[in-house]
Image (tube, rainbow, N blue to C red):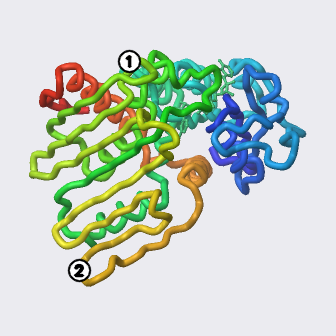
Amino acid sequence: MALDRPFGVGICGLGFMGRQYFSHLREHGHARVVAVCDRDAERRAGKWADPVGNISAGDRERVDMAGIDAYDDWDALIDDERVDVVAVTLPTPTHADVTVRALEAGKHVLCEKPMALTLAECDRMIAAAERTGRTLMVAQCIRFWPQYEEIKRRIDEGQIGAVRFAALRRVSSPPGHSSGAWMMDGAQSGGALFDLHVHDVDFAQYLLGSPANLTANGSHGPSGAIDHVVATYVYNDGRYATLEGGWVYHAPWPFEMAITVVGETGTLDWSMRRGPEIAFCHGGDAPEKISVGDETGWARELDYFIACLRDGRAPERCLPATSRASIALTLRERESIAQGGVLVGVPDV
Ligand SMILES: NC(=O)c1ccc[n+]([C@@H]2O[C@H](COP(=O)([O-])OP(=O)(O)OC[C@H]3O[C@@H](n4cnc5c(N)ncnc54)[C@H](O)[C@@H]3O)[C@@H](O)[C@H]2O)c1
């Protein structure tokens, strides 16, 4: 049902991701932040002097929370009548419970990745969305990241011919920002395998489809779970992809994401370490440089989700079933790693 007013958004969790959402939706054309929830009293009062990542209150001592209801309990936020949309930017172990509860209260839900750490939890979330008829999207932001979006668009248009292989990489030193260091507890975050690498698992699936088989090697790191992985996806038609992910590089290694896709007639390549431009090699002496907008994928993803709600259409670019499939693939990688890198089949995910 279309609304004749901006969607009321309730943000659960005001850490790194919650602040991204807050910044973009505070003054959005079609949405308003009407409620926030955090167990940290200073954070929900808008005192963001402690930077998480590079998101702080800036020069101001406090973020203006006027007109926004603040809760210490996500259950209470969900029951707030002004909230139409619940954004779940809480640590991963809460994702399934908060999402299911919000859907059952009649709210739409945008839940951060990874969807959950088990398929049973993913299934619970999907069943709740189906039962209630509310919209659920998992925030797989790389599908909306301008460089990744542009590379996929050009490939889909045939600009590099048939794809031969892709290489995706996402590495950093251990993240230090998470509240109570929950990310460094593999039981909560799933390690870099689920927290970081799942972005590339999801994008590989979006770009190339689900592989027939995969192998993965990896190692445990500071979280106690798998914190570094190198996986190879193999497709029945001869295509393959390598995916490296992890947070075991030593400080001050910067966060880095990169993608290279080689087709029959051209290569598309982007690394954030080189700058914002994509390099397109298709003959000649120098790569063609492709500029994309400087918006983040987070902002674009939020705009897309809100636009889907306004139009009353399913967010087809990022369906709960494909987010579940990314968890299924990540679990298969973990099985391969546990067996020393054996080839594992990928049953219908
Ligand atoms: N899409 C991306 O690029 C990206 C980047 C970072 C994190 N994430 C994901 O976003 C989610 C949140 O990560 P983060 O980095 O923002 O974590 P964070 O630790 O920075 O923030 C979590 C916030 O939730 C609050 N909180 C924790 N448990 C709570 C509870 N039970 N009730 C109320 N408040 C509670 C904490 O006080 C904190 O403010 C995770 O699932 C993570 O994987 C996604």
Residue 13 vs residue 141: left or right? right
At mark 2, the secondary structure is: loop
Give whichever of discs 1 and 2 has the lower sequence position.
1
Q: Residue at x 77, y 33 (%)?
A: 35
Image position of 10 with respect to 259: above or below: above
Amino acid at pointer 1: Ala
Q: Of residues 22 and 256, which is closer to you in this image?
A: 256
Q: Does the residue labelled 1 lie within 8 Å of ligand 1?
A: no
- The residue mark sitting in front, 1 or 2, is 2
Q: Of residues 250 and 269, which is closer to you in this image?
A: 250
Image position of 22 with respect to 337: above or below: below
Residue 258 vs residue 213: left or right? right
Image coordinates of residue 300 in percent, x first then y, are: 56, 55
Residue that lies at the very extreme toward the bottom in this rendered image: 284
Image position of 115 with respect to 63: above or below: above
The quadrant the N terminus occupies is top right
Residue 254 vs residue 49: left or right? left
Q: Which mark is residue 120?
A: 1
Q: Which residue is drawn at 73% across and 18% down?
A: 73
Q: Which mark is residue 32?
A: none
Q: Which residue is drawn at 53% across and 27% down?
A: 132
How crowded is the residue under tag 1: few (<14 C-alpha within 10 Å), some, or many (20+)? Answer: few
Question: Do residues under tags 1 and 2 come within 8 Å of each other at their CB atoms?
Answer: no
Q: Which mark is residue 283?
A: 2
Q: Is residue 42 visible?
A: yes
Amino acid at pointer 2: Gly
Q: Residue at x 27, y 60 (%)?
A: 261
At mark 1, the secondary structure is: helix
Q: Is residue 89 visible?
A: no
Q: How far apart are marks 1 and 2 (CA)?
A: 49 Å
Image coordinates of residue 29 in percent, x first then y, are: 73, 56
